[in-house]
Image (cartoon, rainbow, N blue to C red):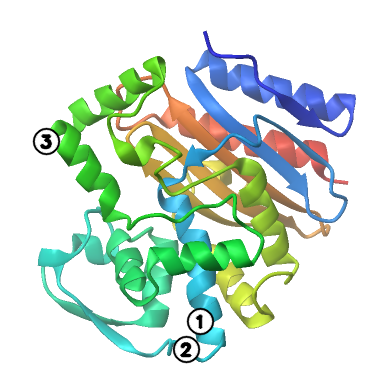
Amino acid sequence: MSPAPVYVGDDGALLDVAEAIAADWAALGVRGSFLARHLDTGERLGFDVDEPMPLASVVKVPLALVVLDRIAAGELDPAHPVTVDPARSSVGPTGLAAFRHRATVAVGDLLLLMLSVSDNAAADTLLDLVPATDVDERLRAWGCGEIRMRHRMNHMYECATGAAGNDFSLALELALRDERVGRHTIETLDPAYANAGSAAALIELLRRVWGDEISVPTATAELRRLMGLQVFTHRLASELRTDTLRWSGKTGSFLHLRHEIGVVEAESGDRVAVAALTRADRCAGLAPDVDLAIGAAGREAFEALRK
């Protein structure tokens, strides 16, 4: 039996919302962590916020910030062209990862592809320029050591293939079995070896990005702009799309992991950062009910925290 969630909330009403979200997730067979924080008042609600989780493509946010920091320092030229060969690029259904022919793309546009359509090939091409060890070191220097960048995006698929061959359904079965027994056949699902972080660490990163309190303002402003261009709206943004709200986010998906982090900003001035990191207990590549539950959690948290 899984341990009971550890809740956080700055008053009884916020704790009630956190408990309701956790109950809704549990009813769907979803575990994980959730945290929402008002960026101006500091009020927050959530559960299991310090639990480290494999981040999948959510790690592209800190990667982008480090690359943008290098650009701001004059160490990288955003207009520098890089040629990507699909025969040697990373696995993925979008962007350069789905290309069939060589393409030359500027560094700045690799960032756009990585954040807007979660292009794994774009991410790994950027990691050719700024290695994962350098990203990890920079995060520690910024005081973000609870967010770890340990490997390229394609390493997730290499580890899954190593455990299950080319059978994605078997890899998913292994991931679910390993969750139950507490070990990890697929190394990149183990927080000790994966690109990993907690909801609390990710929300603190977003708070600093939105407050221009990390790197330099030109880098954080560009990261906010690029996160605002994400095309995927099926999770946290699903119930936060109105003319008076702006969502800037980044999803992450791999096997049974379904994540998203981001910030919702209202015309009223309210700004709430949200992190939802989930593990489902079913063998399903698609789980729209889980995605919708993540969206409902984001809306409930925003409504509870807005002033």
Secondary structure category for the residue under label 2: loop
Instruction: Let me know if residue 245 appears in the view.
Output: no
Q: Counting other residues with Cα less than 10 Å from the Cα at mark 3, is it few (<14), some (14-19), or many (20 or more)?
A: few
Q: What is the C-alpha distance between the residues marked 3 and 1?
A: 38 Å
Residues marked 1 and 2 touching at CB (< 8 Å): yes
Q: Earlier in the sequence, mark 2 or mark 3?
A: 2
Which amino acid type corresponds to the residue marked 2 in the rendered image?
A: Glu
Q: Residue at coordinates 28% horizontally, 29% vertically from top-left?
A: 185
Residue 294 lies in what quarter of the image? top right
Which amino acid type corresponds to the residue marked 3 in the rendered image?
A: Gly
Q: Earlier in the sequence, mark 1 or mark 2?
A: 1
Q: Which residue is mark 2?
A: 75
Q: Counting other residues with Cα less than 10 Å from the Cα at mark 2, is it few (<14), some (14-19), or many (20 or more)?
A: few
Residue 175 lies in what quarter of the image? top left
Q: What is the C-alpha distance between the residues marked 1 and 2?
A: 5 Å
Q: Is residue 41 above or below residue 66?
A: above
Q: Where in the figure is residue 63, as x and y percent of width and height?
A: 47, 65
Q: What is the C-alpha distance between the residues marked 2 and 3?
A: 40 Å
Q: Is residue 164 above or below residue 203?
A: above
Residues marked 3 and 1 touching at CB (< 8 Å): no
